[in-house]
Image: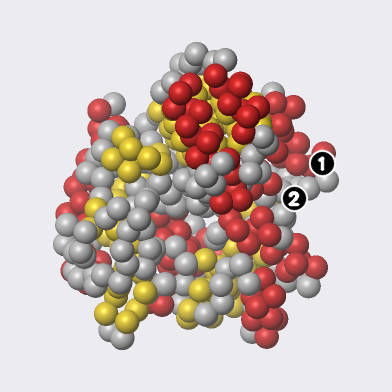
Amino acid sequence: MKVLVIGSGGREHALAWKLADSPHVDDLYVAPGNAGTEQVATNVPIKDTDIDGLLKFARDRKIDLTVVGTEDPLVMGLVDVFEKAGLKVFGPTAAAAQLEGDKAFAKELMQQYAIPTAESRTFSEYQAARQYIAARDVPLVVKATGLAKGKGVIVCNDPAGAIRAAEKIMVDRIFGDAGSAIVVEERLYGQEASILAFMDGQSIYPMEAAQDHKPIGDGDTGPNTGGMGAYSPTPIVDERLMQTVESQILVPVVHAMNRAGTPYKGVLYVGLMVTAGGPKVIEFNCRFGDPEAQAILVRLKSDLFEVMMATAESKLDQVTLKWDKRPAVCVVLASGGYPDKYETGKEITGLADAGSLPDTWVFHAGTKLDGKRVLTAGGRVLGVTALGKDIADAQQRAYFAADKIQFDKKYCRRDIASKALKQ
């Protein structure tokens, strides 16, 4: 079988690495890929948003399954175009991808189907948002409604901070057109968890839970990022909580999308806040999380290609997922200055030493090749991932490997998975 993975981040390297392990996959391509995907697949110099170019490539190479890793092409309708051309593709249609692409849409759906989430209001005009926020006296969260690479959320301790956040998003447009409208919601308290599930329009198959670390600094301080690390499984998601998530969130989402005539197929990512009153949805994503994918996929024993093909063919009920019981920890190495201004083009050393350690993988995100040298090419550069006998062991292994890798102004959080150790 010939498989095309679309994207260039750590998630796509992890997906390509796992798909390359399938006996069904003969030829594997990644568009556009990075320095890491080139180790397990053939990189194709086509941007993930060049839908016409990707379609032509898939037709010319007779691709059997296209796996869409990134959110932009999903929201742009790549799945619709490929399916119309008779090509099998893993991912939701543009209408279904609104769950991530339009936070106002997602909020309205959750309110309509009584899916637990924070109370919120949506605004398309700054002055109206300002007046509403000024009348509040509680901590708030301000979100750009569009796609902002995981950074379009500002957590505010008071209304004054929320007004500044609304101004930055709607007036200064720090997130571009993604901030043409905002969602203002109550701030939830608790621990975050990530639940990812395969969906084929009818069946739901949740994966092992994970916990992401969004803020840039230790102790969850500083601005939000695309994710500074993750671990799986997480002790805050037990069997009872997972059953609640399935019955109160996943099943209603499937019914809602089917009733709207837009069945959801692919991976649905549910970002949760586990509050004293139970789990509440923070956000939906229409693809694998990054870096959750790295921590989850190294634990997956089943053939990922078989699962994805079954999902694309609406045969998910014929699949059984098997997992490595050992936990995994993924530590993201970032460019100094991320998520704000940062420099690229820095040479990375120590990759071979880190990658040769047992039960350890170095997934590339923002990297590129310059001859035989590997250079930084983004804010989040690498995702160093390790399995261990327990979370403490996995954490130690991941940081031991991460410390072998060097590049100018390298930065990482030093507390990934520490929340689990405290429990």
Q: Secondary structure at mark 1?
A: loop
Residues tagged 1 and 2 counted as in contact (Cβ below 8 A): yes
Quick check: 11 above or below 325?
A: below
Q: Is residue 116 left or right of residue 395?
A: right
Element on which disc 2 rests: loop
Q: In the image, what residue type sits under mark 2?
A: Ala
Q: Quadrant of residue 403?
A: bottom left
Q: Residue at x 33, y 43 (%)?
A: 216
Q: Which residue is mark 2?
A: 95
Q: Work out whether 352 lies above or below 228.
A: below
Considering depth in this image, is 326 or 119 the residue closer to the camera? 119
Whether residue 303 sits left or right of residue 364 in the image: it is right
Q: State how many labels appear.
A: 2
Residue 307 location (% of width, % of height):
58, 58
Q: Name the spot of residue 16 as percent of width and height, x first.
A: 47, 68
Residue 67 locus on image (x, y percent): 59, 65
Would residue 82 be seen by someone viewing this image from the given angle?
Answer: yes
Residue 196 x %, y %: 53, 44
Q: Amino acid at mark 1?
A: Ala
Which image quarter is the N terminus in? bottom right
Q: CA distance from mark 1 to mark 2?
A: 9 Å
Query: Which numbered tag is attached to residue 260?
Result: 1
> Which of pointers 1 and 2 indicates the residue nearer the eye?
2
Q: Residues within 10 Å of mark 2 (few under 14, many from 20)?
A: some
**Residue drawn where x is 31% and y is 86% of the image:** 371
Q: Looking at the image, which is closer to me, 385 or 119?
A: 119
